[in-house]
Image: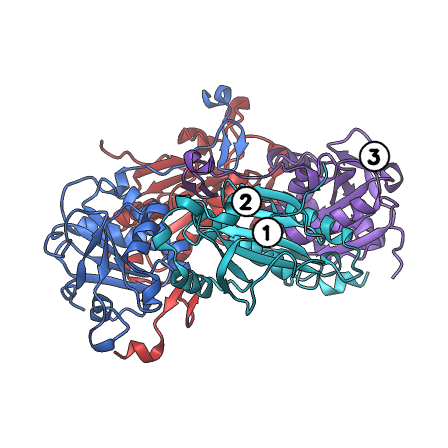
Chain colours: A purple, B cyan, C red, D blue
C-alpha cells in the first residue's frame, strides 16, 4: 500500500510549549510522532503521555519531533486552554502541544481528529520525513514495537545524524553485588 | 569502529528448550539477542528475562532469535542444571537456553562470559546477521531503545521478510468509554 | 497526647457524588478517611486517589466513610467545578467529594486546608467515630500502615459490625499450575 | 467460630536466618505471620515475599514476627537447601525461614503444608499471640486488608507496646512543587 500524505493539522492558534504554530510543512525532513490525547483521559495520563515523553528523551539526538495534539471530544467545558496549560505544567510535559480546532456544525469530534478518523484517545500517529502517514494506532502501544517503527522511519530518512541506536541513554546499572537491576561481577573476579 | 566477529559460545553440552546445540554459525543470517542471566539474579528475573520474552513475541515474524545463556559466577552449587530446568518451566521461558561452561583454572567466571568480558547479569548482547558483535549492555535496557537497535540490525539484513514494524501484535485497546488504556469515541459520534 | 476535635469542613455548597452536604456532625459514629487532593496533582491521580478508592472497597462493610476534599491551592482557574466533575467521572471516583471554600482575603490556600494546616496534596486525614482528628499525613501512605490505623479506629468504635478483617474481598487466587499470583497444588496431590 | 490452635510446625532441622529452631511455643505472646513459599514460585517471588518483607518493616516495633516456611511440593531436586540459601541471600530476605519436612510415604506435599491443608504457594497464615490459627489465605493478599487483620491481632494481645499505628515509617513526601508523590504548598503560602 502506498503511503498517503498525512492530513493537515487543523489546530486553533493555541499552541503551548512552542513560540510558533507547528505544521507538517515546517517539520518536513523530520520524523514526527503525533500524540493525540485528552487531559482527562486516564489511559493518556498513565501511559500514553509518559510514553511520548520517553520517546522525546530516547530519540533526543535524532531528527525526530514529538508533537502533542489535544483532541477533546467529550467534556469540552472541562478541558479548556487554562486547564490544559496547568496540566502540562504539573505533568512536566515539555513537547509542543497544539489544540485541535472544534468540530464543525456541532460535530463533537474536533477537526484534525476527524480528518485522521481517530477512534479515540490516546492515538499515536507516525509521519515520515516526507510528510506521509505511516502508522496510526489507537490505544496503548508496546515500547519495543514503537522503538522499531520509529527507527525504520529514521533510517529511511538517510540523514546521517545519530539515531537512537548509538545513544545508550536509558540504561540502569546494577550496583555492587545484586540489586533490582542485576548482579555485578566482583571487581577482583572481573580481572580474570 | 568496525564491528568485530562475536566470540564463539563456550557452552557445555547442556541446552534447554532446544533439541540441538546452538552456535553462531548455525544462526548466521539471523539477528541474535543473547540474554546472559543467572536464575537467582533478582534484576534478571524481574526485568531482564521478561524483556527477552517480549522481544521474542514482538519480533516473532522477523529473522531474529532470542537465546538465553546461563552465566553463573556466584553460588554455583545453588544454580545447577536441575534447578535451571525447573526455573525455566515455572517462569515459562520458551526460548533456548545454553549453560555457559565453567571457568578454567578456578576462574569463577564462566568461559563465554569471560570471552565477552561481561560485567555481570543481566547482559544483553546484539549480534548481527553476519555474526558480528554490535552491542553489549550490562543492566536493564530501555525498551524503546532496544526496539530501535534491533530494527537497525533487521533492516541491515535485507531479508525482505516482515519485520516488527508491520506487526502490531501488542496493542491494548480501550473499551467503550474510558478505561485504563484510553477513551473511545462513542460509536454514534464516530460516524461524523 | 489527647486527640482534639477535627476542625469543621468549610466547603462551599458544591458537593459531588452525594445529594447532601456532608459535615462531621452528620458522620458522627463513623470512622472517616478524608482525602484532600487536587485534580491536577500527579501524585494524587497516580497514587492517592486510587488508595482512597481501595479503602472504600476493602472496608465497604465497615462503619467507615471515605470523603474527598478538593483543596485547590494553585492553578485555581484550571480546576473549576466543571473540570472536577468530568475528572471524577473519567476516573470513576464514586465517593463523595466536597469543594473546599476559597481562602479569605486573597489567601491562595482554601479554608479547610488552612484550618487543618495541610502541607500540600495528597493529604490523608483519619477522624475517629467521635469526630476527633487522629492522624494527618501529607504524601503517599503505605497501605499496610493505613490498613492498621483504620482498623484501630474501627475497633475502638465498638460497633459490633463486621470490619475489614473478616472480609477477604481482594484476594487474587492462582490458577492451576503456576501463574503470576502463585502455584496451586495439583488436585490429585491435594487429597493427600 | 472458635479459633483452634495452629498445628505444630514440622520442619526439618534446617532453619536459615536464625540461630535456633522456631516453634509456636517459643513465639507464644507474639502475633505471627507465617509465609509459606517456594523459591521457584513466580507469584511468591514477585509479590508474596516482598509483602512479607514489608510487613516485617512496617511492624518492626510491634510484638509481631514474620516467619518464612519453604514448602516445596514440586521440583524437589531443584530447590534444595543450598539453592534456598543463595536465594535468600540474593533477594535480601532477612526473616527466619524454616524448611518444611518432606511428606511421608511418598506424599509430594511436605508435612506442615499438609497439616495446614494449604492449597499452594504463596499461603499467608496469621496466628495470634495465644498460638491460635486466625487466618489462612492462599494467593496474593491485599495490603490494606492484611494491615487491618494484623492490627486486630496486635490490639487483642494487649501488650501495651507500640503497634504500627503510631509508626509512620513508610511515608513518601513530595518535594517542593509537584512530583510523583504530590504537590507541596509553597513555603510563603504555608505561613498564611
- Choose the circle earlier in sequence order: 2 or 1: 1
Q: What chain does mark 3 sit on?
A: A
Instruction: Identify which residue is drawn at 25% across, 75% down.
Output: D107
Expressed as whole percent of the image width and height from the top left, the position of residue D122 reads: 34, 61
Chain letter, disc 1 residue: B
- Foreground residue among C74 and D162: D162
Q: Position of residue A24 (x, y in %)?
A: 86, 42
What secondary structure is found at the residue carrying circle 3?
loop
Q: Is residue D4 above or below residue A56?
A: below
x and y, in percent, of residue A80 in the image: 70, 41
Q: Which residue is mark 1?
A: B8
Q: Are marks 3 and 2 on the same chain?
A: no
**Is disc 1 surrounded by few (<14), some (14 to 19) or many (20+) residues within 10 Å?**
some
CB under 8 Å between discs 1 and 3: no
Residue C86 shows up from this direction: no
Q: Is residue D189 left or right of residue D37?
A: right
Residue bearing the label numbered 3: A21
- Observer-nearest residue: C184 or C149? C184
Q: CA distance from mark 2 to mark 1?
A: 8 Å
Task: Indicate the quadrant where residue B95 lies.
Answer: bottom right
In terms of secondary structure, where does tag 1 sit? loop
Q: How many residues crowd around disc 2 within 10 Å: few (fewer than 14), some, or many (20 or more)?
A: some
Q: Which label was assigned to residue D33? A: none
Quarter location, residue B87: bottom left
Residue at the disc numbered 2:
B115
Q: Secondary structure at mark 2?
A: helix
Q: Are marks 2 and 1 on the same chain?
A: yes
Query: Contact (CB < 8 A) between labels 2 and 1?
Result: yes
Amino acid at each position: 500500500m502506498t503511503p498517503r500524505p498525512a492530513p493537515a493539522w487543523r489546530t486553533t492558534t493555541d499552541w503551548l510549549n512552542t513560540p510558533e504554530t507547528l505544521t507538517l510543512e515546517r517539520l518536513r525532513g523530520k520524523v514526527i510522532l503525533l500524540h493525540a490525547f485528552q487531559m482527562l483521559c486516564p489511559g493518556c495520563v498513565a501511559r500514553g503521555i509518559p510514553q511520548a515523553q520517553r520517546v522525546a528523551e530516547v530519540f533526543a539526538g535524532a531528527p525526530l519531533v514529538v508533537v502533542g495534539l489535544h483532541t477533546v471530544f467529550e467534556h469540552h467545558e472541562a478541558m479548556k486552554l487554562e486547564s490544559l496549560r496547568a496540566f502540562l505544567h504539573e505533568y512536566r510535559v515539555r513537547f509542543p502541544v497544539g489544540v485541535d480546532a472544534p468540530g464543525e456544525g456541532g460535530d463533537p469530534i474536533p477537526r484534525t481528529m476527524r480528518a485522521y478518523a481517530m477512534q479515540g484517545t490516546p492515538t499515536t500517529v507516525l509521519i515520515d520525513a516526507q510528510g506521509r502517514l505511516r502508522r496510526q494506532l489507537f490505544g496503548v502501544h508496546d515500547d519495543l514495537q514503537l522503538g522499531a517503527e520509529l527507527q525504520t522511519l529514521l533510517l529511511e530518512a538517510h540523514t546521517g545524524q545519530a539515531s537512537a541506536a548509538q545513544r545508550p541513554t536509558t540504561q540502569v546499572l546494577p550496583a555492587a553485588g545484586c540489586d533490582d537491576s542485576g548482579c555485578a561481577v566482583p571487581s577482583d573476579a572481573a580481572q580474570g
